[in-house]
Image (cartoon, rainbow, N blue to C red):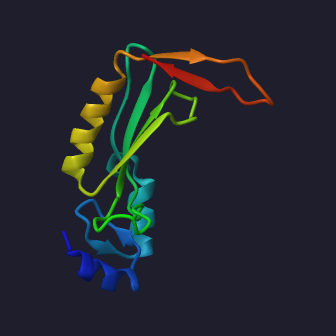
């Protein structure tokens, strides 16, 4: 993976990265992003109904708070189809993303989600565990 200085210099020219953290063009990123098999690292519904999704983003989501690219993300949702996220982690590499996905599965496997009544048309979730 490129060093922080190399990436900082590249950032002026490029904002898109493949799964190996190598710079790619916007057109290459668009093609890869549309490929669900490439984009989705792992998705699963736990026994308690919680949906966990780990994906390649291809854009740096570190927002300047970290020296490393953050091009993968795991999000935890109350259920599949309810996309009010309740936990999120971002990663620099595919290996970190796969490990982080497993850690969030372990963390959320024994949690219970209590569905609250809709307020202003939105349902809120409360995590318990």
Res. 83 image quadrant: top right
- 62, above or below 105, in the image: below
x then y, percent, for residue 98: 24, 41
In depth, the one of 38 and 43 nearer the eye is 43
In depth, the one of 125 and 60 nearer the eye is 125
- Report the number of numbered marks: 0
> Quarter of the image containing the C terminus?
top left
Res. 21 image quadrant: bottom left
> Quarter of the image containing the N terminus?
bottom left
Left or right for 7, reference 11 = left
In depth, the one of 123 and 30 nearer the eye is 123
- 19, above or below 95, in the image: below
Residue drawn at (42%, 14%), measured in percent from left and top?
A: 48
Residue drawn at (45%, 23%), measured in percent from left and top?
A: 50
Residue drawn at (58%, 29%), measured in percent from left and top?
A: 82
Res. 24 image quadrant: bottom left
x then y, percent, for residue 53: 40, 37
- 65, above or below 8, in the image: above
x then y, percent, for residue 124: 65, 27
- 94, above or below 16, in the image: above
Residue drawn at (77%, 26%), measured in percent from left and top?
A: 119
x then y, percent, for residue 73: 38, 48
Residue most toward the right? Answer: 120
């Amino acid at each position: 993976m490129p060093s922080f200085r190399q990436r900082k210099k590249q950032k002026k020219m490029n904002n898109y990265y493949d799964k190996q953290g190598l710079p790619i063009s916007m057109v290459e990123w668009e093609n890869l992003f549309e490929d669900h098999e490439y984009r989705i690292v792992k998705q699963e519904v736990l026994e308690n109904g919680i949906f966990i999704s780990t994906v390649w983003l291809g854009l740096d989501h570190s927002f300047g708070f970290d020296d490393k690219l953050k091009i993968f993300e795991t999000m935890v949702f109350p259920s599949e189809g309810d996309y009010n996220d309740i936990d999120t982690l971002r990663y620099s590499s595919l290996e970190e993303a796969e490990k982080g996905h497993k850690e969030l599965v372990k963390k959320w496997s024994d949690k219970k989600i209590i569905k609250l009544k809709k307020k202003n048309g939105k349902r809120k979730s409360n995590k318990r565990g």
